[in-house]
Every structure is written in C-alpha cells, then in structure tokens.
Amino acid sequence: TMSAGVFSYESLVHAVSGAVGSVTAMTVFFPLDTARLRLQVDENRKAKSTPAILAEIIKEEGLLAPYRGWFPVICSLCCSNFVYFYCFNCLKSTWLKGKQSASSTDLLVGIAAGIVNVLVTTPLWVVNTRLKLQGSKFRNTDIQPTNYAGILDAFAQITRDEGVGALWNGTIPSLFLVFNPAIQFMIYEGLKRQLRKEVPRELSSLEIFVIGAIAKAVATTVTYPLQTIQSILRFGQLKSSTEKSKLLSSLRTIKCLLISRARKHGLLGLFKGLEAKLLQTVLTAALMFLLYEKIASCTFRAMGLSNTHHRRR
C-alpha cells in the first residue's frame, strides 16, 4: 500500500544513512564551502584560488574562521538530507513497486523529493547562510553587519525585522535548483546500474566515490549561476521589492541579478567561486555517497535483509 511505502524501515534507513553521510562529509570539507560562499556574496573580493582565499580568511579573522557557522550548517544539512533521501526512496519504492528503475524515473522522483525538501528546509538554510557570514570581513562596504546570538535568535530577529516571508528568501531559485540533486541522483543511479549490468553486485568503495564525484560535478556546473543567486538572496542584503506579486518579483530579481553580474564581471562572473564550489561539493558528495552506501548496506545486513532492498534499485 501507499502508506507502507511511505512509512517503511527501508526509507528510514536510507534517510538516516544519507543524513549521517552528508554531515560527516561536510564537516571534513567545510572550509572549502566557506571559501565558496565568500566568493559568491562578496562581489569586491577578487576571485583567487581556494587555498589563497582560505589563507586570507585565516589571516584576517583567525584560525577557526573557516569553520564559522559549522553548527547551523550541519543542522540544516542533516534535516535537508534526511528529508531528501526519505522522500526520494519512499517515492521511488511506491512508484516502482519492485520493478527496475530508469533514468527518467530517477529524475522525476528527484525533482519531487527536491520540491518537498526546499519547502520544508529553506528557513534553516536562510538562517545558516546569515550565521555563516556573520562577523566576516567583507570587501563590499554596502553589506550591513548582523548580530545573531544563535539559530533561534536568528529565526526570531529575521521574523521580527523582515517578516516570516524572509525565512523563505531564495525559495524560487531553490525550486529551480531541485534539478541539481535530481540530475545528480539520475547520473549516480544510472552509472550504478551500468556497473551492475553484467553481474548484480555491491560496488567497491572506489567505484562509489568516482561515480558520486562525476554525478555531482555535472549537476553543480550546470546549475551554478542559480546557486550564486540563491546565496545572495539568502544573505538578505538586497532591498525588498514593492511589487505585490511575490513570484513575479522573485523571478524579476533573479533575472536582474544574473544580468547585472554578467555585465559587471562578464559571463564568467556567473561562475565566480565555481572552482571552490566544485572542489568542496564534488569531494563532499563523493564521500557522502560512499558513507551512505556503506551505512545503508551494513544496516540492511544487520536487519537480516541481506541487502536485497539496497540492491534492487
């Protein structure tokens, strides 16, 4: 039945494995994410190599600065990946009913899971973007400093000063960006099926790492300009629009930001910080998929399911 597919141990195992894998991987490569975010939101900071940006941040703001905002990011990531992996696997098992999957199914299920994830977890990402950038030394003097005591205080201040709607800043580009994990999962699951075509088997750690890295690299490069706009909108430093229609206003803002950035820095300006993003996101995603597969595999084995649930996809 539908409810059995939605509320199943299998979906729960995938969700917990995905959440634990992503949190561990993000913690390992967190400084790379700090470098990427600075390049995206601080327009006056010159684009340099990731090590050079990190060296600047440490010199100006201290040794622990690359890990600033780690806790809210990890909380958001844990919730976000739990929701995504849970939705992806329960929708997929409900849709397939034991049949073999196809790339088109993976893409559609990935988009649906992504939409649920965005609507549920965007407020967490807005808060963590603000906390991660709080206390940073910006080259852009127009950026207003913020003073949040923590996650709950940030929620309270944003709601009080900017309204509840501000917690969903960047939702429209985020909804477009559901293609990122959807493309990533489609490529990952497709490559996994190809490797298992001849003999159904468990993939090696190296195979999982490599196909996870390839899937994320393609998805990130394709959607990167929108990720930059998403970061700018979440940071909340833009003047609010007077238009009544929130959707039209958001779409116009995205268009204006893309055009303005392209005019100011050329088309390559839309990809500023991509090197840092690819380095961080590809390594993080590859390690996350590796940990996810291994944790899920061990859990299914411990539950006496002989990993058949895990292999069936």
Image (cartoon, rainbow, N blue to C red):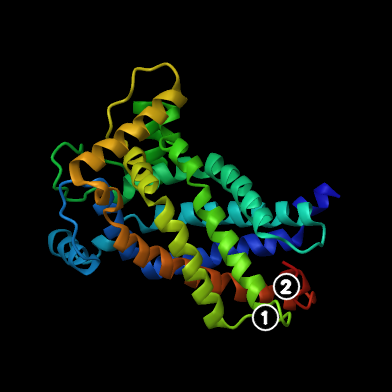
301 and 199: which is toward the camera = 199
Residue 1 makes an appearance in the image: yes
Q: On the rendered structure, is 123 left or right of 308?
A: left
Q: Cβ–Cβ below 8 Å for labels 2 and 1?
A: yes
Q: Residue furthest right?
A: 1
For the point 78% across and 73% down, the residue is: 308
* Towards the viewer: 2 or 136: 2
Residue drawn at x 26%, y 47% is 267
Observer able to see residue 150: no
Where residue 101 sits: x, y (%)?
Answer: 72, 61
The answer to whether residue 204 is above or below residue 190 is below
Which mark, by number, is residue 7? none
> Which part of the image, by quadrant, shows the C terminus?
bottom right
Helix, strand or loop status at disc 1 = loop
Nearest the viewer among 107 and 277 is 107
Provide the residue designation for mark 1. Answer: 202
Query: Badge 1: few (under 14), some or many (20 or more) residues near its Cα, within 10 Å?
Result: some
Residue 255 at x, y = what percent? Answer: 35, 33
Q: Measuring 46% from the left and 36% from the top, which residue is drawn there?
A: 172
For label 2, the SS is helix
Q: Amino acid at mark 2?
A: Arg
Q: CA distance from mark 2 to mark 1?
A: 7 Å
> Which residue position holds label 2?
311
Residue 270 picture location, percent across and down: 29, 48
